[in-house]
């Protein structure tokens, strides 16, 4: 697909429906146009972005709410809009709204901008920038409500960081309480990264009346097991970006030490050219 040959826009309703299909939505997370187009071309039903991948690819740290990452995120969404044969959803960290009274308005503005670019969903987290704890639930609910008012068709996946913030008392109970508040504010799905034990996943599935998203943990999770537990969406997060970076380093090291680079799985130059158009 070239820049001048766009696909027809994918309805956000298609993305919503994928969370209620017979099998859970396996969502690979891309970090640029090439990775997103490649994943969509491989037949995945939808593609997400990874804030770490987008931030790192542009020379920024993740999770700081930086204006440069916001800009890179919007630019990527605009580049993907109408280009993919499937829906895409965008990771926007905490929304880049700042911490003053205008934060809900700014986050809603971003959501509307992404919806106009063709995004079918967003991922909005309640962890504060720089690992500084958790947003008060009432404040996060304000952000969610503002987004849903401005961009009602977007699938808003509310990420709850209770299991990624050290020292959170009773993280499972805290996650459930936050999920209730966020769904009441209009969230369409709940995402609790860091949940691993089957019994915790099952507790969330049983208590959350909305599609539950789990971050895939290599060696700890399998897609089939998470499906059996009732998970509706499985994200790869930054795993694919980090794997690609590791593969690049490994190939460079093999070349440097005189060993074959093991490039048999790498797409050829012409293939990448065809991919991008």
Image (spheres, helix red, strand yellow):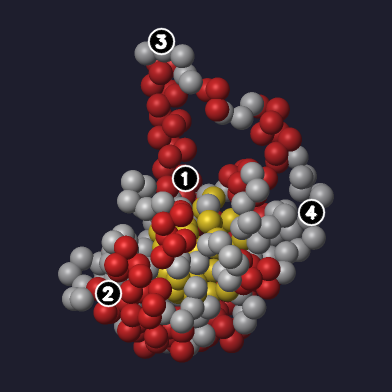
**Quadrant hosting residue 85:** bottom right
State which tag comes first along the sequence, 4 or 1: 4
Mark nearest the camera among 4 and 1 is 1
Secondary element type, mark 4: loop
Mark nearest the camera among 2 and 1 is 2
Q: How far from the left and from the top, in percent, is residue 258?
A: 41, 10
Residue 6, which numbered label?
4
Give the Cα separation between the discs numbered 2 and 1: 27 Å
**Quadrant hosting residue 22:** bottom right
Secondary element type, mark 3: loop
Q: Is residue 71 visible?
A: no
Mark 2 packing: few (<14 Cα in 10 Å), some, or many (20+)? some
Q: Which residue is mark 2?
A: 172
Q: Is residue 185 above or below residue 16?
A: below
Give the farthest residue toward the front.
228
Give the farthest residue toward the top.
258
Residue 258, which numbered label?
3
State which tag comes first along the sequence, 2 or 3: 2
Give the Cα separation between the discs numbered 1 and 3: 27 Å
Residue in front for this viewpoint, 273 or 99: 273
State which tag comes first along the sequence, 4 or 3: 4
Residue at the (32%, 84%) spot, across then down: 177
**Quadrant hosting residue 246:** top left
Mark nearest the camera among 2 and 3 is 2
Mark 3 packing: few (<14 Cα in 10 Å), some, or many (20+)? few
State which tag comes first along the sequence, 2 or 1: 2
Secondary element type, mark 1: helix
Give the Cα separation between the discs numbered 2 and 4: 44 Å
State which tag comes first along the sequence, 1 or 3: 1
């Amino acid at each position: 697909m070239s820049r001048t040959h766009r696909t027809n826009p994918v309805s956000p309703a298609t993305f919503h429906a994928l969370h209620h299909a017979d099998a859970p939505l396996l969502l690979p997370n891309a970090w640029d146009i090439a990775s997103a187009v490649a994943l969509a071309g491989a037949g995945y039903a939808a593609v997400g972005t990874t804030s770490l991948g987008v931030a790192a690819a542009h020379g920024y740290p993740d999770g700081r709410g930086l204006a440069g990452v916001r800009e890179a995120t919007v630019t990527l969404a605009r580049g993907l809009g109408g280009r993919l044969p499937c829906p895409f959803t965008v990771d926007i960290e905490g929304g880049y709204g700042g911490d003053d009274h205008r934060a809900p308005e700014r986050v809603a503005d971003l959501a509307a901008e992404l919806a106009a670019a063709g995004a079918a969903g967003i991922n909005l987290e309640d962890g504060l920038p720089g690992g500084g704890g958790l947003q008060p639930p009432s404040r996060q609910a304000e952000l969610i409500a503002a987004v849903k008012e401005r961009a009602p068709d977007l699938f808003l996946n509310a990420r709850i960081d209770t299991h990624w913030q050290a020292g959170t008392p009773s993280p499972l109970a805290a996650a459930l309480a936050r999920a209730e508040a966020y769904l009441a504010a209009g969230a369409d799905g709940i995402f609790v990264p860091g949940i691993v034990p089957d019994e915790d996943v099952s507790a969330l599935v049983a208590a959350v009346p909305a599609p539950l998203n789990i971050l895939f943990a290599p060696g700890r999770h399998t897609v089939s097991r998470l499906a059996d537990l009732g998970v509706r969406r499985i994200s790869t997060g930054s795993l694919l970006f980090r794997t690609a970076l590791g593969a690049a380093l490994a190939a460079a090291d093999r070349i440097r030490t005189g060993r074959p680079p093991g490039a048999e799985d790498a797409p050829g130059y012409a293939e990448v050219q065809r991919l991008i158009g």
